[in-house]
Image (spheres, helix red, strand yellow):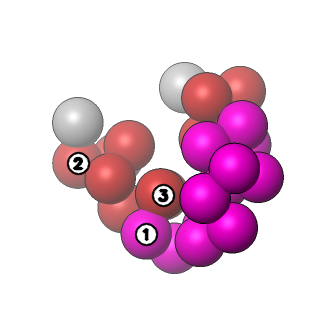
Amino acid sequence: YSEMIIIATTIDAQPLTVDAAWYSE
């Protein structure tokens, strides 16, 4: 999940939102 969070964060440019979304899943 770490890699996916980093990738998603880079694309979305919204670490907090992405982090919450991935951890929620």
Where, by quadrant of the figure, is residue 25 drawn? top left
Question: In 3D space, how far apart are the residues under numbered discs 1 and 2 (Cα atoms)?
Answer: 10 Å
Q: Which residue is painted at 76% across and 52% down in the image?
A: 10
Residue labelled with disc 1: 17
Left or right: residue 16 versus residue 3 is left
Along the polypeptide, which appears first: circle 1 or circle 2? 1
Q: Which residue is painted at 73% across and 43% down in the image?
A: 6
Query: Quick check: marks 3 and 1 in contact, CB under 8 Å?
Result: yes
Q: Which residue type does callout 2 highlight?
A: Ser
Q: Which residue is painted at 36% across and 61% down in the image?
A: 20
Q: Which residue type does callout 3 highlight?
A: Asp
Instruction: Estimate the x, y position of residue 14 in percent, counting from the top left.
Output: 59, 71
Instruction: Estimate the x, y position of residue 19 in percent, counting from the top left.
Output: 48, 57
Q: Is residue 23 visible?
A: yes
Residue labelled with disc 2: 24
Q: Secondary structure at mark 2?
A: helix
Question: In 3D space, how far apart are the residues under numbered discs 3 and 2 (Cα atoms)?
Answer: 8 Å
Q: Is residue 2 visible?
A: no
Which numbered disc covers residue 4? none
Q: Secondary structure at mark 3?
A: helix
Question: In 3D space, how far apart are the residues under numbered discs 3 and 1 (Cα atoms)?
Answer: 5 Å
Of helix, strand and loop, which mostly describes the magenta segment? helix
Q: Is residue 13 magenta?
A: yes
Magenta part of the chain:
6-17
